[in-house]
Image: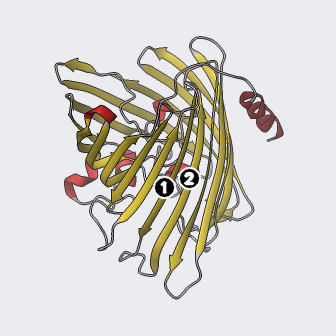
């Protein structure tokens, strides 16, 4: 553990020099363009082995690459985009175990929408856009697309905030280094609304230099639902930083804090923090490391699989990344879970930790 923390500290101290792409921009993959239309695709396959050997074959607390001892597809999607001077549109239907786990509460064809939206430029001179539909979430320093991130598996951070949002987004440039976004939403990762209220989110994106991205997000909304009848207003703050995306040394760190009001009960809070670093060893091979901690003692986001109120847990891991083709990536990651509470299960017994080994082959086109 000490060696991993020391290695990450070295990553944070070394400068890098390349452009950083926003996590909420799901159009980071190359496409084939014909006129105003662009088409692309993405396939993320994996095999994971959880040494706690879950009886149901699902790794608890995760929706990404969540199957145990199974060769499977985490996420595959076709990406179709249209772009004109004052109009843009996007449709990306998705499939895989990530879609099955993360969209299980959506109905019918809605459960296959990674993105589906239309945007119009309201003010061409200022590049002000209004987009409506199903959009990629801006929360935390990782998205559902593993190819864009330093580790293969997702941290606790993105797994417990929205990966997608349904509503409208207003984009307003605030200067050469600042961009503001205002979101009007159905709720916290829902396409079909589960109550009569609407939610509001804000996003401030700051690029102090080409190799830096600092992002601050907020969320406020009524989260009462049939399965959460006592939930009321949720307040959420998220701050993350990304330093480089493709240079020899890269890192990202994220912290967030949320508060959930509840009818007839005290207000509950949850938080997390993580740090991830990557070191390029050769033109094709790099090594990544992550440490993180997630604290949700009153089960706002996660219920303890052993029946306890909530969870407090952390993880540390290393990932070897091999560029096997200009558009393909092979990765092997080992991840160790630990914490003060018994929030995992091994051989029908409650335990405080576990280990996960995952291999992945991902291609984009």
Q: Is residue 128 above or below residue 343?
A: above
Residue indicated by mark 2: 238
Figure quadrant of the C terminus: top left
Q: Is residue 349 visible?
A: yes
In the displayed orientation, state which residue is furthest to the left: 35
User: Where's residue 66, x and y in %?
Assistant: 48, 48
Q: Closer to the camera, 31 or 14?
A: 14
Quadrant where the N terminus is found in the figure: top right
Residue 307 in sight in this render: no
The image position of residue 143, as x and y in percent, is 46, 41
Nearer to me, 263 or 337: 263
Left or right: 64 in relation to 185? right
| Nearest to N terminus: mark 1 or mark 2 | 1
Q: In terms of image quadrants, where is residue 121?
A: top left
> How far apart are the alpha carbons under marks 1 and 2?
10 Å
Q: Which color scheme does this rendered protein use?
A: secondary structure
State yes or no: discs 1 and 2 in contact (Cβ < 8 Å): yes
Look at 56% across and 52% down and name the residue there: 238
Disc number lying in front (1 or 2): 2
Residue under the point 37% across and 39% down: 75
- Circle 1 residues within 10 Å: few <14, some 14–19, many ≥20: some
Q: Position of residue 184 (x, y in %)?
A: 34, 58
Q: Secondary structure at mark 1?
A: loop
Kindly identify which numbered label has been placed on residue 161: 1
Give the left or right position of residue 293, taking residue 204 as reference: right
Quarter-of-image position of residue 356: top right
Nearest the viewer among 292 and 233 is 233
């Amino acid at each position: 553990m000490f060696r991993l923390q020391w290695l990450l500290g070295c990553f944070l101290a070394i400068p890098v020099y390349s452009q950083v792409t926003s996590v909420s921009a799901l159009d980071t993959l190359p496409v084939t363009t014909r006129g105003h239309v662009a088409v692309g695709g993405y396939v993320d396959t994996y095999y994971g082995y959880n040494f706690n050997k879950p009886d149901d074959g699902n790794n608890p607390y995760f929706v990404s690459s969540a199957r145990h001892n199974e060769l499977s597809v985490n996420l595959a999607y076709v990406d179709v985009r249209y772009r004109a001077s004052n109009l843009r549109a996007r449709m990306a239907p998705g499939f895989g175990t990530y879609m099955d786990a993360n969209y299980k509460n959506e109905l019918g064809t809605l459960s296959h929408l990674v993105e589906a939206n239309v945007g119009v430029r309201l003010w061409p001179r200022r590049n002000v856009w209004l987009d409506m539909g199903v959009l990629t979430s801006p929360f935390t320093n990782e998205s559902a697309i593993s190819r864009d991130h330093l580790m293969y598996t997702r941290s606790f951070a993105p797994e417990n905030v929205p990966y997608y949002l349904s509503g409208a987004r207003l984009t307003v440039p605030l200067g050469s280094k600042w961009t503001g976004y205002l979101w009007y939403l159905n709720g916290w990762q829902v396409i079909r609304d589960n109550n009569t209220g609407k939610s509001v989110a804000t996003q401030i994106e700051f690029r102090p230099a080409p190799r830096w991205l600092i992002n601050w997000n907020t969320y406020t909304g009524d989260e009462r639902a049939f399965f959460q009848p006592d939930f009321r207003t949720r307040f959420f703050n998220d701050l993350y930083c990304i330093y480089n995306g493709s240079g020899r040394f890269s890192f990202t760190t994220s912290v967030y804090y949320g508060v959930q009001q509840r009818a007839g009960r005290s207000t509950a809070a949850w938080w997390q923090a993580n740090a991830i670093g990557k070191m390029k060893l050769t033109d094709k091979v790099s090594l990544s490391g992550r440490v993180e901690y997630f604290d949700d003692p009153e089960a706002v986001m996660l219920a303890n699989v052993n029946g306890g109120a909530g969870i407090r847990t952390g993880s540390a891991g290393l990932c070897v990344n091999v560029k096997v083709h200009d558009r393909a990536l092979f990765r092997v990651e080992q991840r160790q879970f630990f914490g003060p509470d018994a929030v995992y299960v091994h051989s029908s017994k409650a335990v405080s930790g576990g280990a996960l080994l995952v291999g992945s082959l991902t291609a984009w086109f």
